[in-house]
Image (cartoon, rainbow, N blue to C red):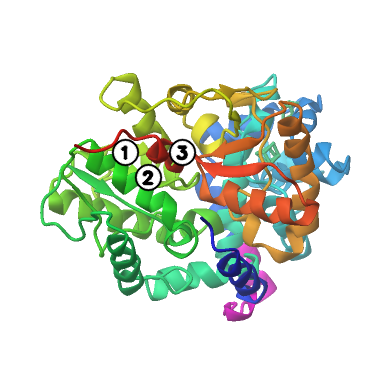
Amino acid sequence: MIDMTVFKQFQEAIRHLGEMAQPESLTDAQRLARAKAVMHAKTDRALALDLEACVNCGYCSEACHFYQSTHDPKYTPTRKLDLLRRVHARETSAFAPLRRLYTPDITVDELQQWQELVYDSCTECGRCSMACPMGINIARGVNVMREALSQAGLVPLELMAVAQEQAGRGTVFGVGPKELAGCVQALRAQGIAIPLDEPQADVMLVTTVIDVLLFQDALAATARILNHLGLKWTLRSAGFEAANFGLLSGNEALQKAASKRLVDEALTIGARTLILPECGHAYPALRWEGRLDDGRPLPFEVLAASEFVGREIQAGRLQLQAGDGSAKLTYHDACKLARHGGVIDEPRAALQALGADFREGTPTAELNWCCGGGAGAFLINRAAPLRHKAWEIKREQIDATGADTVVLSCASCRLNFMEAAEIDQWPTRIASLVELVAERLPPEH
Ligand code: SF4
Ligand code: SF4
């Protein structure tokens, strides 16, 4: 059960998060130079092609929840790349000297305006690219814009504060090894065996500040599943935090450092599998961006919790006590897992094994609508009204299924759903996939 008092305390803490940020004092010229340096460095062949290929057909707008819920032209996905496009046209394109004659240079005021466009109103969900006839990867361009704005010191204060905390103290929202140990102790007191800091293990489980503070049941559920499977696993104090505020804020150095902590611990204990918690952005941060120091691919498997559980069920190693079919469930595919990661069949295998009345939403899987809270948007206070408007698309989609429970595999989505449900007095139950699976584990003999 989620302690709603703790949830409200968490919401209150977010309201004051920005006050902790320490913005860098830079001149306009320095901000512009830093932003452009990133844009130049990141405009490789693929991005240059993306910047040149847009035919202004507008299909991407139809796919974006921020545009669809407001019909404000400023939220047109392709427009979010306009500053990158202009810098490329003037400085790195084939006809740069010519194009400079009729392409205005970007300004610091525009960088300031684009902060809202690439942080508040883009969750890097990738849905626009599914609709684009030219296959333009807008989310990647938006991420490059975040890196440019991060270097220019123009990150939303809430994300800046947490990124600075993670880079400086190594904690997130004040949660470090001591708080993890307290959480483990509390779960052990409930009779759940949780190995911590084992020197060797086949499986390394990582968790997230959100689970430690709010969704301890999700961590407990994953632990119970791993114990039931008889796996040799552990959590590690020196590398347990899956939340990566380097990725969310656009600070590449922090992104790599935060991932390295996890990778180093997994290598130290000889893990063959690293299991991520129910956290959307942790998946691309480690699964796709994670590398060894010398750039080689990771020598161990990285799996999302829902992916791991689904695979075990598909392989017949994990069998559940099926329900009587009366529970009406639907599933929200987190963008980073389904659209970016292809984790689609595995959670459905788990949902089927629950023995419930499972109802697919429309659209679903890789075309599912984003809930509006990902990529750090949930933490940006000024984005709350826009986020809620975008979420209304999601609510209509779920209501149309007639389900009484929506199942999630991402803590950020879960927070966003909880906040929106509280505002709308939405009665649908919001549940974690691993928690539902753990509830249906057969009794131990
Ligand atoms: S990535 Fe998602 S949120 Fe961003 S512009 Fe595209 S559809 Fe909109
Ligand atoms: S769908 Fe693709 S080509 Fe069409 S406007 Fe959007 S980015 Fe440009």
Which residue is tagged 3?
Answer: 436
Q: Are marks 1 and 2 in contact (CB under 8 Å)?
A: yes
Specify start and end residues of the magenta stretch as a single range: 18-33
The numbered dot on residue 302 is 1
The numbered dot on residue 180 is none
Of mark 2 and mark 3, the one earlier in the sequence is 2
Say if 315 sits above or below 201 in the image: above
Q: Foreground: 202 or 424? A: 424
Can residue 93 be seen here? The reply is no
Which residue is tagged 2?
Answer: 286
| In this rendering, the label closer to the viewer, 1 or 2 | 1
Q: Is mark 1 within 8 Å of ligand 1?
A: no
Tell me the CA gap for discs 1 and 2.
7 Å
Q: Secondary structure at mark 2?
A: helix
Q: Position of residue 268 (x, y in %)?
A: 14, 53
* 364 horizontally vs 312: left or right: right
